[in-house]
Image (tube, helix red, strand yellow):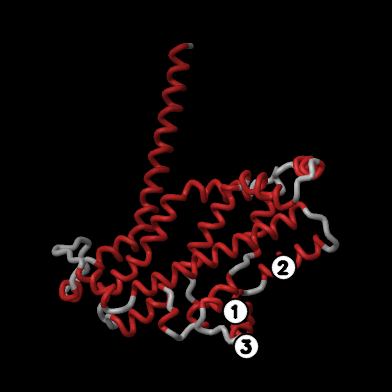
Amino acid sequence: MKKEFERIERAEKNRRLAKNIITYTLLTIWALIVLFPFYWMVLSSIKSYSSYNSEYVPKFIAEAPTIQNYVEAFTAVPLSRYFTNTLIFTVITTALMLVVTVLAAFAFARLDFKGKNLVFTLFLALMMIPSELVIITNFQTITNLGMRNTFAGLILPSVTSVFYIYLLKENFEQIPEELYKAAKVDGTSDLKYLTKVMIPICRPTIVTIVILKIIECWNSYVWPRLITDDKAYYLVSNGIQEIRENGFGRENIPAMMAAVVVISVPLIILFLVFRRKIMAGVSRGGTKG
């Protein structure tokens, strides 16, 4: 009986081991597939122009690495100005969006007002409208207001998000309503209850929203491209086209790759640092009860 039990336990252990080997092998292959484009981008950025063009068969290592392409990335075009513009755009847009999102989510989650369900339904319906149609409307509005080639024109259409309001509303509703009623009995104002109770409890989701908005602003391309034609207001995303056309030239791929690496690294670092908070916030916001 004991030997039979040991045999079953050994077989179960072997099955688990085989399952883990297969799982981690597939994950490793998938990781290599996903990371290869970034590796190739970094590899190309440290190759000299002559070395890159002399490779009839692409090589997977750089025989004579150089940082000259990174030097050109900051000298051939005003890349530092693009970074500054993007930082201003990202910080202000994220801050305003956070205020709007928190207040709207609190109103839908806790306040009672006439037509609340209808308004929220219309909000959700907006998610079904293609973003291209909204861009056309925003472009006409910003142009008529004379805000083209201004930071206000860049920022205003991006200060709200139906998805983030919905995500935070669902998170707020997980907090027992009895706690809100008890606070109201004690004479606590809605604003104080929001700042002292709801925001601290829902901090993981709020941090997630902030990080996702930062990534969204940093990668924003279509709207800045439409609303700005003055290089003084270019962001790093639409500055890439300027780099390609008027900076290094279309044929200087290594220098282009160096610029793309420089632009990508801040977001990669941001995600790696806060990846646990992002996962925790999304899972928390998507869990009811």
Alpha-carbon span between mark 1 and mark 3: 14 Å
Label for residue 65? none
Looking at the image, tell me whether mark 2 or mark 1 is earlier in sequence order.
2
Contact between marks 3 and 2 (CB within 8 A): the answer is no
Nearer the N terminus, badge 3 or badge 2? Answer: 2
Q: Position of residue 122 (x, y in %)?
A: 75, 67
The quarter of the image holding the C terminus is top right
Type of the residue with mark 2: Ala
> Is disc 1 surrounded by few (<14), some (14 to 19) or many (20+) residues within 10 Å?
some
Frontmost of labels 3 and 2 is 3
Image position of 126 with respect to 133: above or below:
above
Distance between mark 3 and mark 2 Cα atoms: 27 Å
N-terminal-most mark, 1 or 3: 1
Residue 213 % position (x, y): 53, 62
> Mark 3: which amino acid?
Asn
The residue at the far front in this view is: 187
Q: Residue furthest right?
A: 114
Q: Amino acid at mark 1?
A: Ile
Q: Is 224 on the left or on the right of 265, as rendered?
A: right
In the picture of the structure, the residue carrying the numbered disc 1 is: 135
Residue positioned 62% across, 67% down in the render:
160
Residue that carries the numbered disc 3 in the rendered image: 144
| Helix, strand or loop for disc 2 | helix
Mark 2 Cα shell of 10 Å, populated few (<14), some (14-19), many (≥20): few
Q: Residue at x 30, y 60 (%)?
A: 39
Looking at the image, is mark 2 or mark 1 nearer the viewer?
A: 1
* Secondary structure under the numbered disc 1 in the rendered image: helix
Instruction: Check disc 2 and report the residue beneath it.
Output: 125
- Give the answer, above or below, for where 219 lies relative to 252: above
Residue 66: name its quadrant: bottom left
Which residue is drawn at the image coordinates 54% and 52% (left, top)? 207
